Structure formats: C-alpha cells, structure tokens
Image: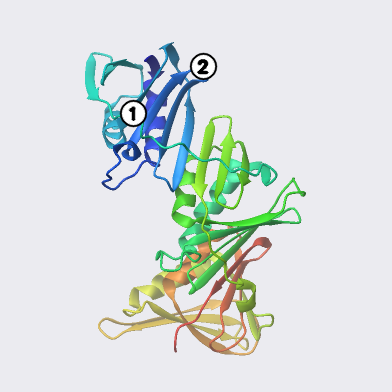
Amino acid sequence: MHISIEKKKFGEAVHIVSRFAERKSTTLPALASVLIIAGDEGIKMRATNLETGIDLKIEGECATQGVVALPATLLQHIASSLTEEGIITLEHTGDIISLTSGTGKSSIKTVPYDDFPSIPFPENPKNRIVLPGVLLKNLFTSIASCASSSTVRPELASIYLSIEGGILTAVATDSFRLAEKKVPLSNKGTQGKFLIPAKNALDIAQALPDDDIIMSFDEHQCAFVSTSGMLVSRLTNAVYPDYRQIIPKESIVEAVVLRKDFENALKRTTIFSDTFQKVRISFDPKKNSISFFARNADIGEASETLGAHVSGSALDLSFNHRYLSAALALTSAESLSLTAAGIGRPLIIKGVGDTSLLYLVSPMNQ
C-alpha cells in the first residue's frame, strides 16, 4: 500500500472512525484498530466494536493497493499532532507502515487484520427511507440524554424509532421523564419500528453527514448509507413500553410562559435546591402567574414568580430541576406550554407552535 491524503482530511477521518473502535482493553486487537483499505473503490477507513461499525470513504491518491490495520488510539494521537495543511503519505512494507508528513516520519507496527470482523448490513432492503442526515443527527442528539444510563433495562437505554403514515417518531425515556419528537417524511410508504441503543445513536450522530442518507433496518441491525460511506448499529432486542398509557388525556391546569423567563427563573432558583435537586412549581390562575421555589437547609431558600397565561385550577408540584431544564434543549419555541393533570400526575411541556415535541416529567414527592 502506498497512499497520499491531505492532512486535514486524514485527521478528520481518523477522529470520526476511531470513535467506533473498541475503547476498552480487548483480547482481539483488531477491534481496537482502524482498518485502512486502498483498492479499486478508492481509500476507506473501517472500525467496529461489534456494537457499531463504520466504513468511511476518504479522498486521496492511491499509488499501490493494500490493507493495513493500525491501533486507533495511536492514530488519534498522530492525527491530533498534525498541522492542517499539507499531505501525509502512508507506505506499507512488511509489518511496518511509514507515515511521512513534511519533514517528519513515523514507523508504526501494524496489527494483524485477518481477525477484523465484517460489518453486518441489514438483510431486508424493503425497510428503508431517505432523509436528511442533519435531521437525524439533531433528533438523536436532542433526545438521547432522556434515555436511561443504566443497561439493566436495555429498552430504556435505547431510542425507540417508529415510522408510520409518513411520520418518523423518536422516543426516549428513563422512566422519570420522556421525550417524544415527530418528524414528517417525504417517503410515506415505508413503515416499521426498532430500538437503537442511545449510546450508539450518539456515536452515529457525530459521524453523520448533513446531506441525504438512506436509513435501512431489519430485526438485528440498522444502517445509514451516504455518498461518504456507511454506519451500522446493532438494535436492541426488547419490547418498548407502551408509553402512550402514561400521557394524561386531560389536564386541570395549563400555563403558557415565555421560554427565556422560564429558563432564567429556573436557573436562579436551582441555586438553592436541596440534595434531591427539588424545585416546586406553583400554578396560580387568579394572579396569572407561576412560581418556582427551592429550599436548602444548609444555605437558604429562593422563589421566583413569572407572569403567565394560566387557566384551570391552582396546583403545586415538585420536580427534579435537571429534568425541567432538559426540555429547553428540545425546542426552539419562544413560549412554552405547561399542562398538569393533578397531584402525583406528570407535567407535560410543549413548545407553543412546535407540534413536533412532547416532553413529560414525573413529579417528586411534595
């Protein structure tokens, strides 16, 4: 193998691909490596940790073809040390690959690539839709944090994706709060549903291009294919809970408040929250206001009152303030709608004019 790549493109590719290599110590060195392939289809980099995988095309000059595997961590260090301008040349001889960049030269011992696993591709081509990569990227990054960080219940550590009637619905919950985002699709024929581990979705989001991609899936894998390559993730084999059952059908109070007022008041009040991060929200329809209150026995207490359009009955509910503030990252609407069905019932937050979002948060004991 003898290839030449612009240093900037080489560095960007290494940082993207190495994310999919095994990060922990492993008995199979190939899993902690990046596979570089120079062949008839050009230059590619591959990596997989058996959970996710990537096959990325890179622009460059290929003088002679070949295949080589190099430790991902070492490649990352080299890529981080490169200046952006210029060309890097990789030349393979025996079990050594030479990297030449400007006046510098490094010799790296290669990893046997025979053990490098193949990256599986979904077997059912019928389940496929075309959508902008930037849309899916924003979808994954916005709701993945609402999934459970524990793998005790793998379905709750996943993002539920459903395609029905030309709508892509993404849901994530850790049983304390739930986020649902809906996106209209131009392809209305495809239907299906699957669970992708939230951590896999975040890694994929970091590598997705903004341009159109083809998302395809079967019972075991989903793939995201673009002109620049392919990303693959295994799917969670579990049944997602019927989350619609916990969404209140009716409400006893609704408040509409400016997003910036909500954010600023919450931020100031949470300084005084206790070890349980508790903040109380009070709805007052007579004064057309909502209030935040927090008390910490060690430092003091604070309250903030906001003007709002409130209809219904007076109500006090307490929440973990982190779950309340998480809603702000899910919508860009200027005003928020807060609806509650009563004591002990979840609070629903929506962006006014934003029909794509439903965010639900369960209350704490008063």
> Does residue 309 appear anywhere in the picture?
no
Q: Nearer the viewer, residue 264 or 124?
A: 124
Number of the label disc, if any, that sits on residue 40: 2
Q: Which residue does the numbered mark 1 point to in the structure image?
A: 69
Say which label, 2 or 1, has the lower sequence index. Answer: 2
Nearer the observer, 11 or 45: 45
Quadrant (top left/top right/bottom left/bottom right) for the N terminus: top left
**What is the number of callouts on the image?**
2
Relative to 41, say whether 159 is above or below: below
**Amino acid type at mark 2:** Asp
User: How is the rendered protein coloured?
Assistant: rainbow
Q: Amino acid at mark 1?
A: Ala
Is residue 314 visible in the rendered image? The answer is yes
User: Which quadrant is the C terminus positioned in?
Assistant: bottom left
Could you say where residue 73 lies in the image, as x and y percent from the top left?
Answer: 28, 37
Above or below, 271 relative to 229: below
Find residue 210 and report its image quarter: top right
Question: Callout 1: 10 Å neighbours few (<14), some, many (20+)?
Answer: many
- How would you rate the neighbour count of disc 2 (Cα within 10 Å): few for under 14, some for 14-19, many for 20 or more? few
Q: Residue at x 49, y 58 (%)?
A: 144
Q: Say whether residue 4 is left or right of residue 335.
A: left
- Real-space Cα distance between discs 2 and 1? 18 Å
Residue 170 pos. (x, y %): 60, 58
Q: Secondary structure at mark 1?
A: strand
Numbered disc 2: secondary structure: loop
Q: Residue furthest top?
A: 63
